[in-house]
Amino acid sequence: MGSYRSKIKTLPELKMECERIKSQGRKIVFTNGCFDILHPGHTRYLEEARALGDYLIVAVNSDRSVKGIKGPHRPVTPQEARAELLAALSFVDAVIIFDEPDPYRLIKELVPHILVKGGDWAEDEIIGADIVKAAGGTVARIPYIEGFSTTAIIRRIAKNFDSGV
């Protein structure tokens, strides 16, 4: 078995892999996010997402994309490191970095069977749901896990530095 870093794919590589998986009758699950500081909320969410199918693709916002969404002080962790940490998780099968504000183009290219987002997203706001549903797939929402948030972690770190810890 190769290095977990081989799970980080380009779009052409991932398209070929998806074609192979689909030809085997296996279900592809797709989710996306910034994953700036990996925490148990992320890992539990991704493990649940993987349990919905046979092959989990995690699309990670590029540094430029995160800055546009979260602001000029983010991301804290560079895109290559975020992708590598996600690829190291046993229940993640593939990781791809995308530069757009949302993963619509990726979803259109890959057409997964199951599109997953957190429960804090209303189904009608989930980008790409139209593509997946039109192809006969489903959209799943995994309940938000209280107590874990990258923003909260960053605030705790900043507060500790402000208090001299």
Image: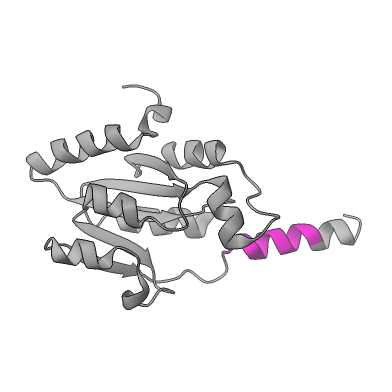
Question: Over which residues does the magenta segment extend?
Answer: 148-158
Pick the quarter of the image with the C terminus.
Answer: bottom right
Residue drawn at x 21%, y 61% is 132
Q: Work out which residue is located at the far right of the displayed protein and give it.
A: 164
Viewer-proximal residue, 121 or 37?
Answer: 121
**Where's residue 50, x and y in %?**
29, 52
Please name the residue shown 38% across and 48% down the image: 58
Q: Is residue 28 shown left or right of residue 106?
A: left
> Within the magenta stretch, is there residue 157?
yes
Residue 79 in view here: yes
- The number of numbered badges drawn on the structure is 0
- The image quadrant where one finds the N terminus is top left
Task: Name above or below for residue 122 compared with residue 153.
Answer: below
Left or right placement of residue 3 versus residue 163 in this view: left
Colour logic: one colour
Viewer-nearest residue: 2 or 36: 36
Q: Position of residue 136 (x, y in %)?
A: 11, 63
Q: Is residue 38 visible?
A: no
Q: Is residue 91 left or right of residue 162?
A: left
Going 79% across and 59% down the picture, which residue do you hit? 158
Residue placed furthest toward the top: 2
Q: Quadrant of residue 7?
A: top left
**Is residue 154 placed above or below 62 in the rendered structure?**
below
Magenta span: chief secondary structure: helix
Quarter assignment of residue 154:
bottom right
Above or below, 25 against 131 in this view is: above
Q: Pinpoint residue 28: horizontal percent, then vertical percent.
A: 21, 49
Image spot of residue 106 (x, y percent): 32, 50
> Is residue 97 shown in magenta?
no
Q: Residue shown at 35%/43% (left/top)? A: 92
